[in-house]
Image (cartoon, helix red, strand yellow):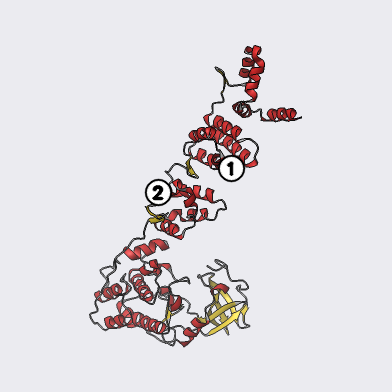
């Protein structure tokens, strides 16, 4: 998509005059995917101005091919120019003269005598000239103002050397099944003609209400249904044009023969191959997004490199399209470990959360493991990332507990405490049991502690030494709200 997506190219607005002669009167489409379309006026005659975005400028080779094409059934470009850095094509404007907007009834006679044969000749001229039209649809076929009984095909074409990438304004609803595999040749134009005919005889689009992925899947799997009122001759033409196997799809010759009432067979050898949901991870095939997530969770270091893998994105796009944007967003995160944590949760929400291969699904067990771990780096990293409070929220812990876990995470980020203090404070908060055990006594408040000291006054020095050397004691005081007093006490001891 051009940088000017959904807005007009810079330097072009209604009321402007292009090249001192074409006055822009109205915007028809601000962004077709490659250009903005205007109604313009020159000497009081209406024209269509197609203003290409700078990065979508047609190649000189394509322009030369277009100029060489000559057909009475094609709308000719009447002028080409460059203005404000944009390539512009000027062509006749047929207001409300296309097959839909005109309101003219379409019957077999009009189809067989005019629409189908005229479009067929126009496509032959384009294909013989080395181009693909790329956008055959009812709104690009116009009744000619120059003579009765004729239609004209407009807005073409795609250079056949680049036809595997129909990134121009091609309407997704008219794309053929082979486009799912990146194939886009002249056969696509005949498929689009077939879909156009279906739309004309049924009054609705084959793929109404579907997104692009759904359209392509339906095109690959759906047999087009036609009402009984459609004549056998027209049904056969439509079926010939909409074979899923593009190698047997009808083209120019078959259409001419069918219009001449010859018996032209319809052959379709297409076999639908659903897109794979198997991902090659560390040389091992893993089937399904849920299993992929589990493999990532337990093989963390290898999985980090897969976050932006196009093969993974394609599986998500095919089998969990609603998750695609969220997965894509993970790949744009700066912290790849945090990105993988989120990615795993997106792919398999029922899987217990993991952090660098360590399960953190049970916060209390996480705290226990952290308290006894010799190397606490992994746990501190998990707190620093903010995922522990995220998991606590997912597990619907009380808002007060989640808030306190977030305070612990902030302490870790700011380097405000030792690993041991952090471990014990977190354990206190998560268990919501603020009890400090000394000897056979359980203290739940400073008052309980004072009473314990008084009852052991005869061995005060030993008791105080036990407090001072016990990390749990200081963590307990901090969770009771005496963190500032501890700081002052430590500062006084340092003097």
The extreme right residue here reads 495
Image location (x, y in percent) of residue 495: 77, 29
Image depth: mark 1 or mark 2 in front: 1
The extreme left residue here reads 263
Q: Disc 2 marks which residue?
A: 290
Q: Which quadrant of the figure has residue 4?
A: bottom right
Secondary structure type for disc 2: helix
Q: Is residue 332 above or below residue 257?
A: above
Q: Disc 1 marks which residue?
A: 384
Secondary structure type for disc 1: helix
Image location (x, y in percent) of residue 153: 42, 80
Q: Please rate how many residues cluster around mark 1, counting C-alpha atoms within 10 Å: few if below 14, some from 14 to 19, many from 20.
A: some
| Camera-nearest residue between 433 and 33 | 433
Inspect this view and state whether residue 313 appears.
yes
Image location (x, y in percent) of residue 166: 45, 71
The residue located at (32%, 76%) in the rendering is 107
The residue located at (65%, 41%) in the rendering is 414
Q: Is residue 212 above or below residue 462?
A: below
The residue located at (55%, 66%) in the rendering is 6
The residue located at (30%, 71%) in the rendering is 243
Q: Please rate how many residues cluster around mark 2, counting C-alpha atoms within 10 Å: few if below 14, some from 14 to 19, many from 20.
A: some
In primary-sequence order, the first of circles 1 and 2 is 2
The CA span between labels 1 and 2 is 27 Å
Q: Which quadrant of the figure has residue 473?
A: top right
| Camera-nearest residue between 136 and 373 | 373
| Camera-nearest residue between 478 and 467 | 467
In the shown orientation, is residue 219 left or right of residue 411? left
Would you say the residues marked 1 and 2 are in contact, meaning their CB atoms lie under 8 Å apart?
no
């Amino acid at each position: 998509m051009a940088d000017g997506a959904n807005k007009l190219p810079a330097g072009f607005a209604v009321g402007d005059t292009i090249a001192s002669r074409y006055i822009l009167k109205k915007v028809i489409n601000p962004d077709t995917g490659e250009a903005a379309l205007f109604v313009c006026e020159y000497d009081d005659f209406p024209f269509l101005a197609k203003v290409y975005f700078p990065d979508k400028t047609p190649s000189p080779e394509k322009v030369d091919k277009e100029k060489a094409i000559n057909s009475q059934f094609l709308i000719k470009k009447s002028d080409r120019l460059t203005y404000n850095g944009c390539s512009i094509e000027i062509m006749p404007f047929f207001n409300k003269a296309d097959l839909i907007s005109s309101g003219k009834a379409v019957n077999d006679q009009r189809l067989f005598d005019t629409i189908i044969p005229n479009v067929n000749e126009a496509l032959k001229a384009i294909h013989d000239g080395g181009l693909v039209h790329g956008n055959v649809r009812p709104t690009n076929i116009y009744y000619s103002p120059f003579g009765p009984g004729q239609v004209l095909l407009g807005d073409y074409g795609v250079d056949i050397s680049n036809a595997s990438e129909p990134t121009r304004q091609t309407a997704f609803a008219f794309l053929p099944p082979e486009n799912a595999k990146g194939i886009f040749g002249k056969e696509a134009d005949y498929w689009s003609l077939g879909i156009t005919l279906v739309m004309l005889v049924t009054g609705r689009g084959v793929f109404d209400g579907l997104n692009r992925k759904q359209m392509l899947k339906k095109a690959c799997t759906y047999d087009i249904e036609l009402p009984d009122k459609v004549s056998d001759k027209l049904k056969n033409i439509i079926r010939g044009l909409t074979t899923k196997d593009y190698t047997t799809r009808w083209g120019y010759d078959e259409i001419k023969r069918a219009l001449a009432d010859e018996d032209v067979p319809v052959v379709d050898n297409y076999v639908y191959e659903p897109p794979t949901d198997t991902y090659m991870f560390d040389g091992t095939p893993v089937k399904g997004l849920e299993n992929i997530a589990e493999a990532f969770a337990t093989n963390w270091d290898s999985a980090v490199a897969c976050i932006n893998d196009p093969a993974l994105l394609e599986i998500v796009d095919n089998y969990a399209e609603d998750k695609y944007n969220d997965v894509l967003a993970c790949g744009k995160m700066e912290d790849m470990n945090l990105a993988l944590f989120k990615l795993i949760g997106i792919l398999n929400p029922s899987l217990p959360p993991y952090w660098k291969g360590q399960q953190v699904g049970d916060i209390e067990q996480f705290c226990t493991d952290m308290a006894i771990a010799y190397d606490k780096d992994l746990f501190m990293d998990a707190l620093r990332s903010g995922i522990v409070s995220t998991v606590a929220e997912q597990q619907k812990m009380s808002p007060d507990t989640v808030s306190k876990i977030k305070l612990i995470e902030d302490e870790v980020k700011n380097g405000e405490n030792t690993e041991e203090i952090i471990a014990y404070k977190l354990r206190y908060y998560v268990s919501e049991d603020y009890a400090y055990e000394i000897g056979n006594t359980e203290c739940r408040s400073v008052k309980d502690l004072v009473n314990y000291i008084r009852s052991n006054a005869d061995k005060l020095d030993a008791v105080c030494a036990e407090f001072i050397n016990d990390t749990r004691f200081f963590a307990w005081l901090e969770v009771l709200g005496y963190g500032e007093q501890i700081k002052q006490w430590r500062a006084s001891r340092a003097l």
